[in-house]
């Protein structure tokens, strides 16, 4: 009973953390590129345009969309493994069945909603609804709204194949630039399943050491995403062991730690949590601003790309935050509120569909408000220092108009597509299993 309750609580706060991270990613994509100050360092020049409190940790966390993705990966490593681990010692046959079922269904669970998104977003582009200038390697070159279908079908196909990493030398995101995470989610989930299988018969402490060494090794060799997944797996293993230790303690087999030991452990855990938040706030600046300057001297040999170096620090921050929140009950309380749980429920749909709403609605609203109130377009109004109040009103109007339908659409997509994809994957698995017999 205790184990089940604690497992439920952990799942609740993890859902809340995932939901908060998805909301921050949506806010990041809503503001990045146009709201410039939050994405510069506090120490950037000229000083008159910076030195804002929201450029410093922990306030900058509200704009730290890139680092939130690493939080997703740590949480996923935990979530895909914990239910399987619970069956390993008590029901080996069910453990194997659960593991093989998870491997089979994972692709359906991820890619059915992705396929629906690709169809909807390309339909929106074909109908001329998207008002967005694509960046490098984005968009659909050769395809125009209300034109020949062939370029659109080609772009749609290549976009979906790119999310599967089956596009060969071509990299086509269409208008779904954020789907690069899906292939990592799928491949790293399979890696977690492989580690679970390979270490199933190993003693618990040896298993923990092996998972830790794998996570550290992949971090060292420039694969922070896989390292984050394996860290999530390691946390799941630790929590299962902690539950067993708690049961033993209740049976009187172990002595409780002293108050001094508990206080020292709490202080250390708090410091590690603060360090994790600090690393998650690292700006996407390859030169490392002064408040992160010590990291510029820590150059690992396999981190030749500045973006990967920053991602590595984000991964370390995500690992520290998730790892320490497991022990900080009072900090988990906000993640178990109704709002956080609601965001957790729609987090996958919110992550998938928020760029489409932004590309269709944001620029049109910003332009309309600035034209109506100031007589110039949004970008001209931004350059006018006396129009700061108009810019604030424009952003407020855009957020007020855009986010309610986005939340509503995410609710329906979570109910109609996200949850149904789980049921469909079970149906396909049962069909194949019956056919094989």
Image (cartoon, rainbow, N blue to C red):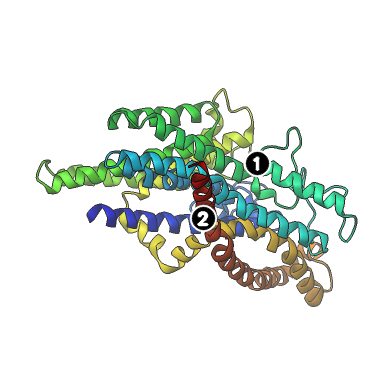
Residue plotted at (41% across, 39% down): 233
340 relative to 195, above or below: below
Residue 436 at x, y = what percent? Answer: 51, 41
Residue 339 visible in image: yes
| 391 on left or right of 216 | right
Q: Is residue 36 visible?
A: no
- Please tell me how many numbered marks the rendered image carries: 2
Q: Which mark is residue 164?
A: 1
Contact between marks 2 and 1 (CB within 8 A): the answer is no
Check the picture and name the quadrant holding the N terminus: bottom left
State which quadrant residue 30 falls in: bottom right
Earlier sequence position, callout 2 versus callout 1: 1
Image x and y of residue 182, in percent: 60, 45
Q: Position of residue 259 (x, y in %)?
A: 16, 47
At 61% from the left and 53% from the top, the residue drawn is: 112
Number of the front mark, 2 or 1? 2
Circle 2 Cα neighbour tier, 10 Å, few/some/many (<14 / 14–19 / ≥20): some
Q: Give the quadrant of residue 63.
A: bottom right
Q: What residue occupies the far top of the structure in this picture?
A: 301
What's the mark number on residue 422?
Answer: 2
Between 50 and 164, the one nearer to me in the picture: 164
Residue at the far left: name it.
252
Q: Residue shown at 44%/28% (left/top)?
A: 214
- How many residues crowd around disc 1 within 10 Å: few (fewer than 14), some, or many (20 or more)? some
The residue depicted at 36 percent of the width and 57 percent of the height is 332
What secondary structure is marked by label 2?
A: helix
């Amino acid at each position: 009973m205790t184990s089940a309750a604690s497992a439920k609580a952990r799942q609740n706060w993890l859902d809340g953390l995932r939901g908060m991270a998805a909301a921050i990613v949506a806010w990041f994509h809503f503001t990045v590129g146009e709201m410039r100050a939050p994405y510069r360092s506090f120490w950037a020049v000229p000083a008159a345009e910076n030195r804002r409190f929201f450029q410093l940790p922990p306030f900058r966390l509200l704009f730290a969309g890139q680092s939130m993705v690493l939080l997703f990966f740590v949480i996923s490593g935990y979530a895909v493994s914990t239910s399987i681990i619970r069956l390993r010692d008590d029901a080996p046959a069910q453990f194997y069945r659960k593991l093989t079922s998870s491997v089979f269904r994972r692709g359906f669970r991820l890619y059915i909603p992705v396929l629906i998104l690709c169809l909807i977003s390309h339909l929106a582009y074909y109908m001329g609804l998207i008002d967005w200038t694509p960046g490098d390697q984005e968009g659909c070159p050769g395809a125009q709204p209300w034109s020949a279908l062939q370029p659109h079908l080609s772009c749609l196909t290549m976009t979906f194949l790119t999310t599967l990493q089956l596009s060969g030398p071509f990299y086509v995101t269409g208008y779904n630039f954020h789907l690069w995470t899906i292939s990592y989610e799928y491949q790293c989930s399979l890696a977690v399943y492989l580690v679970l299988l390979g270490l199933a018969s190993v003693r618990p402490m040896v298993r923990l050491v092996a998972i830790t060494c794998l996570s550290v090794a992949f971090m060292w060799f420039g694969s922070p995403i896989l390292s984050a997944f394996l860290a999530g797996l390691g946390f799941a293993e630790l929590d299962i062991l902690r539950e067993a230790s708690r049961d033993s303690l209740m049976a009187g087999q172990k002595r409780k730690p002293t108050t001094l030991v508990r206080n020292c452990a709490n202080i250390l855990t708090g410091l590690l949590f603060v360090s994790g938040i600090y690393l998650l706030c690292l700006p996407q600046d390859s030169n490392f601003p002064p408040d992160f300057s010590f990291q510029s001297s820590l150059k690992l040999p396999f981190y030749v790309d500045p973006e990967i170096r920053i991602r590595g620090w984000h991964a370390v921050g995500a690992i520290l935050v998730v790892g320490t929140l497991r022990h900080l009950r009072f900090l988990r309380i906000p993640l178990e509120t109704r709002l956080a749980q609601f965001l957790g429920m729609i987090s996958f749909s919110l992550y998938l569909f928020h760029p489409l709403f932004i590309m269709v609605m944001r620029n049109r609203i910003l332009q309309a408000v600035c034209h109506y109130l100031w007589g110039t377009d949004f970008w001209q109004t931004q350059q006018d220092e006396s129009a700061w109040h108009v810019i604030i009103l424009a952003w407020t109007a855009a957020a007020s108009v855009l986010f309610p339908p986005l939340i509503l659409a995410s609710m329906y997509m979570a109910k109609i597509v996200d949850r149904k994809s789980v049921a469909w994957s079970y149906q396909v698995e049962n069909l194949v299993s019956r056919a094989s017999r």
